[in-house]
Image (cartoon, helix red, strand yellow):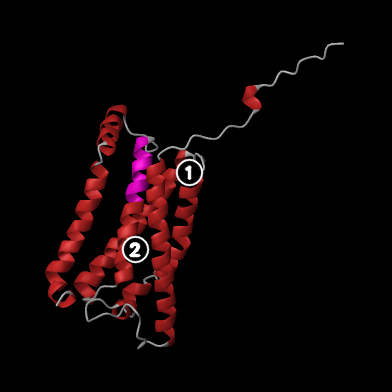
Amino acid sequence: MNATPVVVDDRSVPTRAEVRHPKTFIEMLVSSVIGLVASLVLSIDAIALAENPNADLSCNINSVLSCGTVGASWQASLLGFPNAFLGLIAEPVVITIAVAALGGVRFPRWFLNAAQVVYFIGLLFAYWLFYQAYFVIGALCPWCLLITITTTTVFASLLRVNILDNNLGLPSGLHASLSGWLRAGADTLVVILILGILAAMIFLKYGSVIFG
């Protein structure tokens, strides 16, 4: 007696999801991990300053590069607690998004749009803190500068994904134009230009002290 052949529906067999924009999500992952480490160090320093306002922190290098001076200012605890605590909350979320995306997870448009808005607020906050440190406090925190850099790169990576996938709902002509610029590396040049301007500002105002 012949056995009845079993037909397997290939559609029921799970396949590995396509990973979109792997390089961009790797950049996002690396940046957010670095940002998390910096936030952890700053959180530890904030606790040390709370216990002893005159604590000699490891990044108190000179009168300009001084985490202690920045950490003791009111700007360092704008919401009533150390700003670094926000990084301990936000960076693991970004790490999760990057890891999940590299594993093939496709997030809904509303989620990535919400993440873009939240991180835009974080970007504004990071540059406001840089402004305060540069023009008002008169001292710079190396770990804070590192967070400014990683916040910039994560925001750029997330924006790149949202534009290429048109999660922002852009008109077709504008979407095609921006996508072309992104594929040509225009966003990378913009990030380099922004960070270059920050470096030049620091060198022009504090170079003699930092490198003297």
Q: Is residue 115 above or below residue 106?
A: below
* SS state under label 2: helix
Q: Which residue is mark 1?
A: 101
Give the residues drawn in magenta, as a range.
155-164
Amino acid type, mark 2: Ile
Amino acid type, mark 1: Ala
Q: Quadrant of residue 131?
A: bottom left
Q: Is residue 95 above or below residue 106?
A: below
* SS state under label 1: helix
Q: Which residue is mark 2?
A: 147
Q: How far across and down, in percent of the image, does residue 18 sit?
A: 49, 34
Name the quadrant of the C terminus.
bottom left
Q: Residue at x 34, y 58 (%)?
A: 150
Residue 80 in sight from this viewpoint: no
Q: CA distance from mark 2 to mark 1?
A: 23 Å
Q: Main secondary structure of the magenta part?
A: helix
Q: Dot 1: within a 10 Å radius of its alpha carbon, few (fewer than 14), some, or many (20 or more) residues?
A: many
Q: How far across and down, in percent of the image, does residue 72 sit?
A: 33, 80
Q: Residue at x 29, y 36 (%)?
A: 183
Q: Dot 2: within a 10 Å radius of its alpha carbon, few (fewer than 14), some, or many (20 or more) residues?
A: many
Q: Residue at x 41, y 72 (%)?
A: 41
Tell which circle, 2 or 1, labels the residue nearer the N-terminal end: 1
